[in-house]
Image (tube, helix red, strand yellow):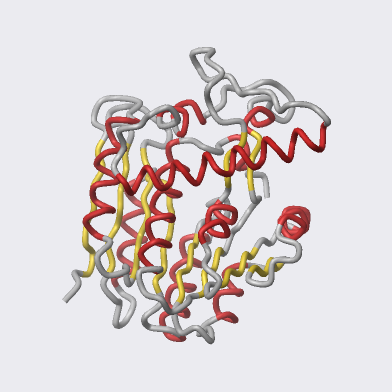
Amino acid sequence: MNYRHQFHAGNFADVMKHAVLVRLLRSMQVKEKGFLYIDTHAGRGGYDLGAAASGLTQPRSPEWPGGIGRLWSRTDMPAELADYLEQVRLFDAFARTAFSEEAGEAAPATQDDKGVSDGPRFYPGSPRLAQGLLRPQDRAIFYEAQPDEAAALAQEFLGLKKVSVQALDGYQGVKAALPPPERRTLVLIDPPYESQDEWTRIIATITAALVRMPAATIAVWYPMTTRAKLADFYRQLLAIKQLPPCYTLELTVGGEQSGLKMRGSAVLVLNPPWGAETAMRSLVRYLAPLLAQAEGAEGGLHWLVPDA
C-alpha cells in the first residue's frame, strides 16, 4: 500500500469525516444499551503534524492548515462541531505530554500557514476519537491489514479490555464480527481507495453486513472525484435488496470548475441513528464556507432511501 495518511492528516476531508463520526457515536449513545464500534481501516491512533510536513524524501506543504487549522482557534461553532474540536484538543494535549515525557523536553508547537504557533501538533485518527468516547458498556474492534500499523495501534491500546486491534482485512472482519452480542453496531468503512476493486468490495461488505444485521448503522467515507465512479457506486448501492434508509453527507470545498484534484468528500450513512439528521445537515453546511478553497463550496445532506 502506497497511501500514507499522515501527509493528509487533519485536512478538510478529515475534519468532515471525524466530525460526522463523533456525531454518530454520540447519537448511538442516546440509548443506554451498549454497542460495538467497528473500524475497517483503522490506520494509526494519531499523527504528528510536524513530521507529516517533512514528506518521505523532501519537504511538502501540510494540508492541516486548510482543515483543522481553520477551526482551531474558533469559539463560535455549533455544538456538534464544538464537541469534535474538543476531542481533537484533548488528544493533542495528551500526545504533547507523552511526546515531552519520551523526549525529555517540551513538544514543539506546529506552525500554521501564517507562521502562528497556535495550531495543533498532533491529530487523532478515528481509533483514538472513538476510544475516547466509548462508555463502559461500549466496545470497539479496529481492523488494520498493514502489520506494522496494526502492531503500533495494538501497543497504543494495550490493556484496554473494551478495545480489540486485529491485523486483518477489515472487509472480512465485518462479516466475522456481525451480529455482535450487543445487538447494536456502528461500522466505519474508510479505505484508502488505492485498489481498483475498492468500490466493489465496499458494496459487497455492505450487502453482507446487512444480511447478518439488517439494523446495523454503517458509515462509508469516500472522496468526491469523478462523477462516473460515484454514479456507478450509487447504482450498485440502490440495487441492494431491502436497502435500509440512508443518506449522503457531502462537503465540497470548490465548484466543478475549480480545478481541484479532490474537491470534496462524502459520508454515506445507512440506518442513521434517529434524530441525527438536523445536526448532520447543520455540520456540513457550517463547514463549507469555513473550509472553502475556491468558489462553489457547498455542504448538504441528501436522502437516497428516505426514512419511512
Q: Taking 279 as reference, is 307 above or below it?
A: below
Question: Based on the displayed image, in which of its 4 quarters is residue 6 positioned?
Answer: top right
Query: In the drawing, does residue 10 fall left or right of residue 104?
Result: left
The total of numbered circles placed on residues is 0
Task: Answer above or below: position of 266 versus 217.
Answer: above
Depth check, front residue: 158 or 15: 158
Residue at 61%, 23% (x, y): give it.
110
Residue 1 location (% of width, % of height): 68, 50
Residue 203: percent from left, percent from top? 43, 69
Compare residues 294 and 237 and report the one nearer the observer.
294
Query: Image point 51% across, 37% down: which residue?
Result: 10
Q: Residue at x 36, y 80 (%)?
A: 215
Q: Is residue 280 above or below residue 262?
A: below
Depth check, front residue: 143 or 231: 143
In the image shown, does 107 or 177 lie closer to the viewer?
Answer: 107
Q: Is residue 80 left or right of residue 129?
A: left
Q: Which residue lies most toward the top here?
A: 115
Position of 119 compared to 167: left or right?
left
Relative placement, left or right, of 214 versus 256 is right
> Is residue 305 positioned above or below 266 on the image?
below
Which picture quadrant has residue 307? Answer: bottom left
* Residue 75, horizontal then vertical, whole percent: 35, 32
- The residue drawn where x is 38% and y is 53% is 20
Assign the C terminus to one quadrant of the image.
bottom left
Most extreme residue toward the left is 308
Q: Tell me residue 77's x, y (percent).
A: 31, 37
